[in-house]
Image (spheres, coloured by chain):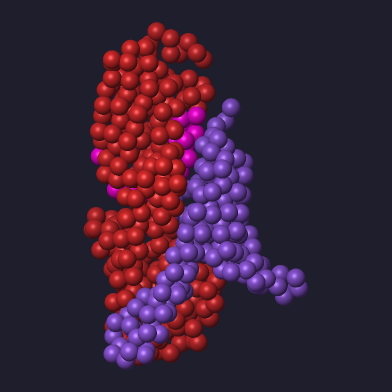
Chain colours: A purple, B red
Amino acid sequence: MTIEMIRLMLIDGAMAAIAAIGFAVLSNPSRKAVFVSAFLAAIGHALRYFLIKSGLEIWLATFVAASFIGLMSILFARIIRCPAEVFSFPSLLPMIPGMFAYRTILSLIKFMQTSDVQKAQSFIMDFYHNGITTMFILLALVVGVSLPILFFPKVSFSVTRKY
Amino acid sequence: MNDNLEGKKPTIEQTAVLLIDIASALMSSGAHTMRIIQNVSRMAETFGYDLDLSVFQMSIMMTITSKEDPSKLLTHVKKIKPLLLNFTIVSELSALSWETYDKKLPLETVKVDFQQILAQKRMSKWLVLILVSFANAAFCGLFGGDIYAIGLVFIATLVGFFLRQRMIYRNINHLVVFTTSAFAASLLAGMCYVFQLGSTPEIALATSVLYLIPGVPLINSILDILEGHILTGIARLVNATSLIVCIAIGLFTSMLILGLEKL
């Protein structure tokens, strides 16, 4: 891990944190929860960036990062006494496969409009490739973040208990 | 503390009305089904009743049974208000349910606390608008957009999200709202193509609609399905998917207008 890598990871994390703050306020959580989700998004996204750079497939890296965020959010839920879902969702959002989804739609439209058979075949290949990647990343995100909640049901349902 | 309840157990009607209000508030603020059931059952137990609950997309059905006399029961159905995410309500109601359970709070106190929680003000609309725009611009940066793309996405989100806020305020159908704001945002971001700004117009177009992604319903639906509330989970999943399809339609339309040769 070089200095350059660390610098890139820091930039990546900072942008993920800004994104998470914006998406957190959509669901009107408490102030503390907004900061926690920014923090979790930053480390989660930097972790995924590191994993991808070190050669892991994108959906697997996403799954690992999402489970990490899920675990950490249960820990933070315990500390600031607030259900884990409140900040696990906005901290996941920076990992949404936006470009893949866009290319899926793009290749679909191009397929629809072309009359050349050869081109049409390559567009439909693009469509399936990008579409399946999008779906797998989305599944990896939601299942990855829900697993810790399922593994520790007692903890995740009693974080708001004070006594 | 315990003598609060002795001799004056709340009537079955009072309890049912309060608990179904709480369940419906939780549902419309975006809690997942398991949390709703756990919270409300915990309160019912404190007041000396057993409770069974079915949650649907549009209504909640609840039967409440007296613990001493199982023949004494009451069923109540209530409509759910449209989803307006509010996690402050979810976490504070969750805390209130534990407080009720641990301190054996009387029903009147719970009622007052519940009204107070509901009456809290939301964060200022303008602040949310600015923060969401910055968030989407940061998103564009994450995907590798250059400074022109980031700037245009900021403006596109500002306009698109403002449209969405106004339309939700006027109670327009939420599918129409999503399609229109996705269309407006992506058309504005498409200006990157029209005026040849920067080298990453594709990223600007793709990220301009991401602020609309219905993440909470999506995660709630998977949580519901994984925990065995299949029907509610599928209802939420269909809801989230139809919103995503609407976003795609909006993006699709502006891509057709911009012309595909350039894309």
Q: Residue at x 33, y 45 (%)?
A: B231
Dominant SS of magenta comes to helix
**Residue B44, located in which quarter of the rendered image?**
top left
Q: Residue at x 30, y 42 (%)?
A: B56
Q: Residue at x 27, y 22 (%)?
A: B74
State the extent of the magenta-drawn residues as a range. Answer: B79-98
Is A110 in front, or is B89? A110
**Residue B180, located in which quarter of the rendered image?**
bottom left
Residue A87, image x and y in percent? 52, 50
B87 magenta-colored: yes
- Give left or right: position of B256 versus A138: left
**Residue B251, located in which quarter of the rendered image?**
bottom left
**Of all residues shown, which one is farthest toward the right?**
A2
Query: Relative to B118, is A106 above or below?
Result: below
- Give left or right: position of B179 versus B114: left
- Give left or right: position of A64 versus B215: right
